[in-house]
């Protein structure tokens, strides 16, 4: 049954002011389905989502820092939750999940990481100190420099299987070079073999 003109006008006013279908229906003693149909016929989009009253005023970086605890040697341990599958330090901020290391990297470097973030220190299993975090390009550059210093650098243009080292070379933490593509292919072959 259509609404009388006065109710329809009041409904249009409430909806344009941001009322939800439920709130408008309660204010006018109509059902929510009617409010929803009028919203659609008037071309008014959904009501803006109101922020949760318990939403943290902290930034994501500040929240991460509240879960980091100083440890010996300039390291930091994680006091928040970890994933069950592999123990990755994670936390939720404003309904979004973050890894502690990616935010620690952002704190230290002022930008989002490229690739995986790891702790490049003597406690890589658990450390989340922002100054110890490195992303893929930073890790590759540091390890390449270590390979040169330790005499492990190679001048080969290709690996044994013909992959160009300029594109596929990666380094172990000690600076030893290896072919990333060969490593990935071998890993896949081991998975398939069972």
Image (cartoon, helix red, strand yellow):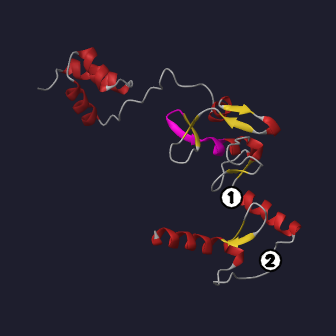
Could you tell me if the residues under marks 2 and 1 are in contact, i.e. CB atoms within 8 Å? no
Position in image of residue 89 (x %, y %)? 60, 41
Magenta span has 101?
yes
Which residue is painted at 22% across and 19% down in the image? 7
Position of residue 117 relative to residue 43, above or below, is below
Position in image of residue 170 (x %, y %)? 70, 68
Give the mark nearest the N terminus, 2 or 1: 1
Residue 136: numbered disc: 1
What is the tally of numbered marks visible in this picture?
Answer: 2
Please provide the residue range marked out in magenta.
93-103
Q: Is residue 38 left or right of residue 58?
A: left
For disc 2, the marked residue is 154
Which residue is painted at 76% across and 34% down in the image? 71
Position of residue 95 relative to residue 108, above or below, is above
Magenta span has 83?
no
Position of residue 161 relative to residue 108, above or below, is below
Q: Is residue 7 left or right of residue 108?
A: left
Within-10-Å neighbours for mark 1: few <14, some 14–19, many 20+ = some
> CA–CA distance between discs 2 and 1?
20 Å
Which residue is painted at 71% across and 77% down in the image? 165
Quadrant of res 175:
bottom right
Position in image of residue 67 (x %, y %)? 65, 31
Please name whichever residue, 182 or 144, is drawn nearer the observer in this view of the structure: 182
Which residue is painted at 87% across and 71% down in the image? 151
SS type, badge 1: helix
Q: Is residue 145 left or right of residue 14?
A: right
């Amino acid at each position: 049954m259509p609404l009388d003109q006065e109710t329809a006008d009041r409904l249009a006013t409430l909806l344009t002011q941001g009322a939800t279908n439920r709130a408008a229906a309660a204010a006018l003693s109509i059902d929510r389905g009617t409010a929803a149909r009028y919203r659609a016929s008037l071309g008014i989009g959904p009501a803006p989502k109101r922020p949760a009253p318990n939403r943290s005023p902290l930034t994501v970086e500040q929240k991460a820092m509240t879960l980091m605890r100083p440890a010996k040697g300039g390291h930091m341990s994680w006091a928040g939750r970890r994933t069950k599958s592999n123990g990755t330090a994670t936390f939720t901020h404003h309904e979004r999940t973050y890894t502690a290391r990616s935010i620690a990297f952002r704190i230290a470097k002022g930008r989002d990481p490229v690739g995986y973030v790891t702790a490049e220190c003597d406690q890589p299993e658990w450390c989340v100190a922002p100054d110890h975090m490195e992303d893929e390009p930073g890790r590759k550059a540091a390890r390449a420099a270590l390979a040169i210093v330790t005499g492990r650098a190679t001048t080969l243009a290709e690996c044994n299987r013909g992959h160009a080292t300029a594109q596929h070379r990666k380094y172990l933490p000690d600076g030893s070079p290896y072919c990333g593509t060969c490593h990935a292919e071998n890993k896949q072959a081991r998975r398939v073999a069972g």
